[in-house]
Image (tube, rainbow, N blue to C red):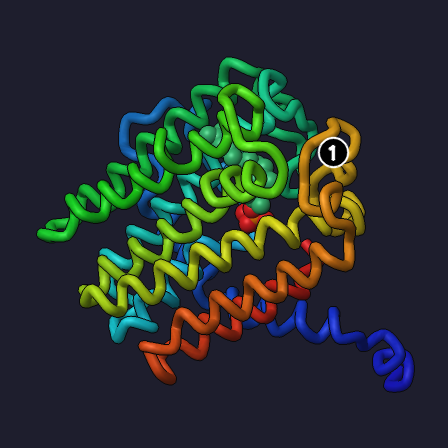
Amino acid sequence: MASNSMENTTVDSVSGKALKALLSPCAACAEADLVRWLVPPGTPEALADGMRYCMAGGKRLRPAVAMLAAQAVGGSAENELVRRAAVAVEMVHVYSLVHDDLPAMDDDELRRGRPTAHVRFGEAMAILIGDALLTRAFGVPAECDSPLVGRLTSELSRAAGAEGMVAGQVADMNLCDLPKGLEGLRYIHLHKTAAMIRGAARMGAVAAGADETALQAVSDFAEHLGLAFQLFDDLLDVTGTAGQLGKTPGKDAETGKQTHLAAVGIEEAKRLGEEMTLTACRALEPLGPAGETLKELAILLTRRTH
Ligand code: GRG
């Protein structure tokens, strides 16, 4: 028994457990908070079911980034405004997954190991579930009696909207002009992926009362973390299985999507992802030891398998 478990021990399996251990306290908070705040009174039961179905599962990376950023700037992850910010970002993230999976966009049938929203509930309901999650995400922090609410909702709007994630999706779907090659790819990754991860860190830090230097540090960290995260996501699309990823692998190649892998190959993409991660970690230097947990998260994410 003992020797079998040793034989099965790999750097990836150890890192996977360490990543789960790091994320799980934040994920547990987010689960409890979603029970309280996701579905407002008066929501039709069919819509509430759909919202809960879509929110279930996932790594809860963005809530963790928000909560750990709050700690890194000297605040507490337990603070109610931090927790509201954390789940608000996850609601926007999940809305974007639901809409991205629609036939008009990526047309995916598997998400978080289960049928996508439009497969399960039909296309009209899937669109409305996404709409409900996006609008609720602004209500959750706004319902807190704090002078920081306006800054938080503005951060969320900038990260998610026309100058953030939606711009990235428009570019990714070839619906606007973009520079060719790696420059265009960087634009897509910065907007589609990094904007929300950066937004999560900024919202956690703002909710925790960060000063300008600390806010800038976690913001720069999370932007590079987001870029690295997307690079490793592209790698997993090639190397992962549906069982590991909970979504259909190989979509990028099948749809001819431009990725770093197609542009520079697997080894160079890995090297770029690791370099980006180190740049992310260096951005935390002004925070001293308080930035260590965020650094650990960034390093562990380079070895994620889903
Ligand atoms: C519809 C406006 C709009 C945007 C869609 C989310 C998105 C933008 C597209 C989905 C495809 C994709 C590769 C997005 C980049 C971000 C990303 C890697 C999402 C997956 O995030 P994880 O791995 O997912 O954190 P879980 O399920 O763990 O939360």
> What residue is at 50 percent from the left and 39 percent from the top?
187
Depth check: 212 or 3 in front? 212
Indicate the position of residue 154 as horizontal and vertical percent values: 22, 41
Residue 197, placed above or below residue 5 = above
Name the image quarter holding residue 81.
Answer: bottom left
> What residue is at 74 percent from the left and 37 percent from the top?
248
> What residue is at 36 percent from the left and 49 percent from the top?
199
Residue 196, placed above or below residue 122 = below
Characterize the local packing of mark 1: few (<14), some (14-19) or many (20 or more) Cα atoms within 10 angstroms: some
Indicate the position of residue 150 as horizontal and vertical percent values: 15, 44
> What residue is at 62 percent from the left and 65 percent from the top?
274
Q: Residue 212 vs residue 238: left or right?
A: left
Q: Residue 4 vs residue 193: left or right?
A: right
Indicate the position of residue 45 as horizontal and vertical percent values: 41, 25
Q: Residue 66 vs residue 56: left or right?
A: left
The N terminus appears in which quarter of the rendering?
Answer: bottom right
Can you see residue 88? yes
Residue type pointed to by label 1: Lys
Depth check: 3 or 160 in front? 160
Residue marked by disc 1? 251
